[in-house]
Image: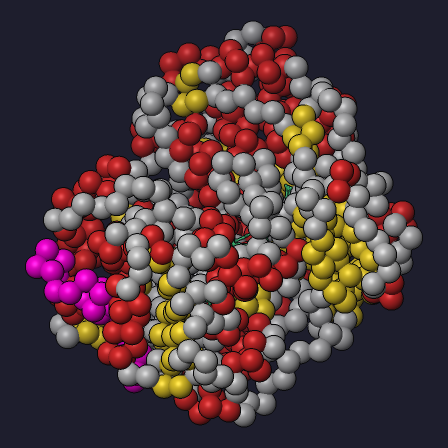
Amino acid sequence: MSGIEDPSDDLSVTPPKRWAAGVPAVAHALEYSLEQTSVRRTALTLLNINQVKGIDCPGCAWPEPGPGRRHRNEYCENGAKHINDEATTRRVTADFFREHPIAELAGRSDYWLNQQGRLTEPMVKRPGATHYEPIGWDEALDLLARELRDLDSPDQALFYTSGRLNNEAAFLLQLFARAFGTNNLPDCSNMCHESSGFALQETLGIGKGSVSLDDIHHADLIFVVGQNPGTNHPRMLSALEQTKRNGGRIVAVNPLPEAGLIRFKNPQKPSGVIGRGTQIADQFLHIRPGGDLALFQALNRLLLEAEDAAPGTVLDQDFIDDRTTGFADFAAHARAVSWDDVLTATGLTREEIEQVHQRVLNSGKVIVCWAMGLTQHKHGVPTIREVVNFLLLRGNIGRPGAGVCPVRGHSNVQGDRTMGVWEQMPQSFLDALGREFAFTAPTRHGLDSVNAIRAMRDGRARVFLGVAGNFVRATPDSLVTEEAMRRCRLTAHISTKLNRSHTVCGDIALILPTLGRSDRDVQATGEQFVTVEDSMSQVHASRGRLRPASPHLLSEVAIISRLARSTLGDEPAIPWEEFESDYGTIRDRIARVVPGFEDFNACVAEPGGFNLPNPVNRGVFRTPSGKAVFTRNEFTMPHVPAGHLLLQTLRSHDQWNTVPYAMNDRYRGIHNARRVVLVNPDDLTALGLADRDQVDLVSVWHDGTERRAEDFTAVAYPASRGSAASYYPETNVLVPLDSVADISNTPTSKAVVVRLEPTAARGADKQAQPDQLGQESVTAGSGRGSWAE
Ligand SMILES: Nc1nc2c(c(=O)[nH]1)N[C@H]1C(S)=C(S)[C@@H](COP(=O)(O)OP(=O)(O)OC[C@H]3O[C@@H](n4cnc5c(=O)[nH]c(N)nc54)[C@H](O)[C@@H]3O)O[C@H]1N2
Ligand SMILES: Nc1nc2c(c(=O)[nH]1)N[C@H]1C(S)=C(S)[C@@H](COP(=O)(O)OP(=O)(O)OC[C@H]3O[C@@H](n4cnc5c(=O)[nH]c(N)nc54)[C@H](O)[C@@H]3O)O[C@H]1N2
Ligand code: SF4
Ligand SMILES: [Mo]
C-alpha cells in the first residue's frame, strides 16, 4: 500500500502574487522532483532537458532558443516538475491492482492516482471482473486486434491521442487507423487550439502560428491575450523580458490579473534572483470573459477612423490591395460597431481602448499571442478571425517582428497534426498516404472528441483506444462521458501513469504501459530517438536518457506497430516490423508523405533540428483566392441571466492538465485546496454571498437541465465583474456536451453559465427558468447583452 493519501481540502488564501518565477520557482521545482525521484535521476533529467542532444521537455510547446543560445538550465519550474513526475521511482505493479478493486480506484482523486507512480506491465480487466490482472503483451494486443476486427464497421473504433505523443508514433497511429479503415482520430487539439486552426486556415491558409522567437524578441508591441504564461508557458516570460529589453511594449488582456503578466523575476539570471524583476505588461486590460472579439473590433474601428482622418498614414494600403480580399465588406461592418456594445461586452472603458489604439499607431511591428482564453469560447473562431483582421490592417503578417502566435499546449500537439492526426485531414494528405502504402485511405471525415462521446453514448462506437491522454477527465460533461465509455465493448489506454480513464472501463479494459519521453528507447537496431515540433514549427530530436521504469515497457511505436500487425496481418506495403526496429525508416516514409519533411533524417540530425517555413512569411497565402482573407464577424456574447456568473475552468500552477501535482496555486494565493471558485468581491456581495462561503456550482443549460459540482469555497478575488474561475478537471462535470464553439466544435470550457448555491441550501427547490438561460447569442446592436450584476 502506498503512503499517499487522498488530499483533503485545508484552504488558506494569501494575496495574489504580483510577480512570477524567481527563487521560489527553482525551490518548488526541486522539492517536487526530489519527492518523486532520486537526486541522480533528477540531475540527469534536468541536465538534459531542452538541450541539443537531450530530452524535449514533455511540458508545453514553447520553443527553445537556437543551439548556441541556450541557457545551461533551459527549463522552468513546471518543466522540471513534469519531467520528474515522469522520472518518478514510484511504481504501480500487478500487486497494486490485486489490492485495489477498480471500483475503489474510481473513487480516488486524480492526484492520488498519479502519485502511485509509473505503470509497469500490461493489465486486463475481463468482462464481469472487479480487478485488473496481468496479461502478456501478445495476448493483450491480440485481444484488442480481435475486438477491432469483430466490429461491424471500422468507424465503430476511436483512436484518441494527446499532443504528448511524438511524431513517429503519431504518424504510425494515423496510418494504422486509416489502413484499418477509419478517420476517427479525435485528439486533445479538438478541445484546445482547434478554434485557432480553423480561423487561421480560413484567413491565412495555414492553421499554425507565423512568428519565431526572434520575432517575439524584436516586436514593437505584443498582445498576450487569454493566456497565463507564468504558469502554462513559463519560458515565454524570458522571451517577453527580452522584448522589453529591446524596447518593445506589452499589452495583456485577461479577466484575471495573472502574476506572470505583471512582473517576472528570471530565475536564470542574478538580476532575477535579487532584483525587482521585469515589469511585463505595460498595460493590462481587465476584460470580461468572451469580450475579446468586441475589443479587437473596436480597435479595428479606431484604425479605420484614424486612416479616414489622415489618409495614407495608418493602414498598409498596398498590402491590403495586393495581398488580401474582403476588405470593403469587413470595413463597412467594423465601422458600424457600437461603443455601447463594446463597453458592455468588454467591461473596459473607452479611454483604455483608445490608449491601446495609440500604442498600436506607435508600433511598426505587432504580434498577438493567445491561448485557451480565446479558443474555448462559443465564438472562439470569429474572435481569432478578428485578431487576423486587426493584424492585416497594418500589414502585420508575414514580416519580421509581426504576426500571429497561437501558443500551443502539449509539447508535440502541433507535430501530431502535421503527422496527420486529425479527423479531417485534407484529401491531398490522404492521397499521399494511400500512394505511399498502397491502400485507399477512407475519405469520410472522422469523429472529433465531442462527437466521439456522442457516438459511444449512442452505441455507435464500441472500441476506444486512448494514447498519451486522459480522455474522461479532459472532456466535458464528465458524467455523460463516463457513462458513454462504460458502454464500450473495449477500452484501452497506452499510458505512462495511472489516471481516471483507466478506472472507467468498457466490458473489457486494457492498460498498455509505455516508455516516457525521458526513458532510453532501445530497439533491435539500437538506441532510438524521436522527434517533435514546437509551437513555432521547429522540428527536432528528443533522446531519453533514463533506465526505463520497468523491463516490461514497450515504446509507443512498438505497441502501435505490433497492434497494427496483429489487426491487419503482415502487409508487404506497410513494414510494421521494420518501423519498430528502426525509427529512421518511419522518418523516411514521413519524408515522402508530409510536405516540408523531405530529407527528414538528414535535417533532424542537425543540432536544433529544422524549421518548417510558414508560407505566410513568403507572402504566400494558401487560401482559395491565394490572398489573406478579411472576415466579417458578428460579435456575440453569452447570455448570462441575472443572479448568474460566467465560469471559466482553468489550470492551477500545480497541475499538468488533468493531473494535479499538488493542491496549490501559488501565484493566485490559493493553498491546500482545489475546490475553490474565484469571484469578484462585488459580485459576491450582489449575490448575497461572503468570502469563504461554501457553495455548489450549478450550471444551467438552455434545455433546462442542470449540472452540479458540490462543495466549493467562494474566494473573493480580483476577477472581472460577472465572471468566476475554477479549476479543471473538477469542474468538467459542469460543461454541457452540447456547449461547443461554432465551427471548431471545441467545448466552451471558458464560458459556463453557473449560479452559486449555498451548500447548506442543497436540495431546496431552485428550478431553472429554461427560457432565461443558456448561451443563446446576443448580436451586437440588439442591446440585449445582459450581465450578472
Ligand atoms: N503548468 C502547466 N502548463 C501547461 C498546462 C498545464 O496544465 N500546466 N497545459 C498545457 C496546455 S495543453 C495548454 S492548451 C496550455 C494552456 O495555457 P492557457 O491558455 O494559459 O491555460 P488556462 O489555464 O486554460 O488559462 C487561460 C487563461 O485565459 C484567461 N481567460 C479566460 N477567458 C478569457 C477571455 O474570455 N478573454 C481573455 N482575454 N482571457 C481569458 C484566463 O484568465 C487564463 O489566464 O498550457 C500548457 N501548459
Ligand atoms: N474544463 C476544461 N477542460 C479542458 C481544458 C480546459 O481548459 N478546461 N483544456 C483542454 C485542453 S487544452 C487539453 S490539451 C486537454 C488535455 O487532455 P489530455 O491530453 O487527454 O490530458 P493529460 O492530462 O495531458 O493526460 C495525462 C495522461 O497522459 C499520460 N501520459 C503522459 N505522458 C505520456 C507519454 O509520454 N506517453 C503516453 N503514452 N502517455 C503519457 C499519462 O498516463 C497521464 O495520466 O484537456 C482539455 N480539457
Ligand atoms: S516553458 Fe514549457 S517547454 Fe519550456 S521548460 Fe517550461 S514547461 Fe517545458
Ligand atoms: Mo491544450
Residue 698 can be seen, yes or no: yes
Q: Nearer the viewer, residue 211 or 629?
A: 629
* Residue 156 versus residue 285 in the image, above or below: below
Which part of the image, by quadrant, shows the C terminus?
top right
Q: Position of residue 427 (x, y in %)?
A: 26, 37
Magenta span covers which residues? 549-575
Q: How is the image coloured?
A: secondary structure
Q: Residue at x 42, y 29 (%)?
A: 202
Q: Nearer the viewer, residue 250 or 132?
A: 132
**Is 748 on the left-hand or right-hand side of 316?**
right
Q: Position of residue 680 (x, y in %)?
A: 81, 50
Residue 550 part of the magenta segment? yes
Q: Position of residue 319 (x, y in %)?
A: 42, 17
Q: Residue at x 33, y 36 (%)?
A: 614
Q: Nearer the viewer, residue 419 or 743?
A: 743
Q: How many marks?
A: 0
* Residue 447 versus residue 461 in the image, above or below: above
Residue 246 can be seen, yes or no: no
Which part of the image, by quadrant, shows the N terminus?
bottom right
* Residue 417 versus residue 622 in the image, above or below: below
For residue 428, what is the image quadrant?
A: top left
| Farthest-out residue, left | 572
**Is 659 on the left-hand or right-hand side of 785?**
left
For residue 383, what is the image quadrant?
A: top right
* Residue 260 versus residue 98 in the image, above or below: above
Q: Position of residue 565 (x, y in %)?
A: 18, 66
For residue 150, what is the image quadrant?
A: bottom left
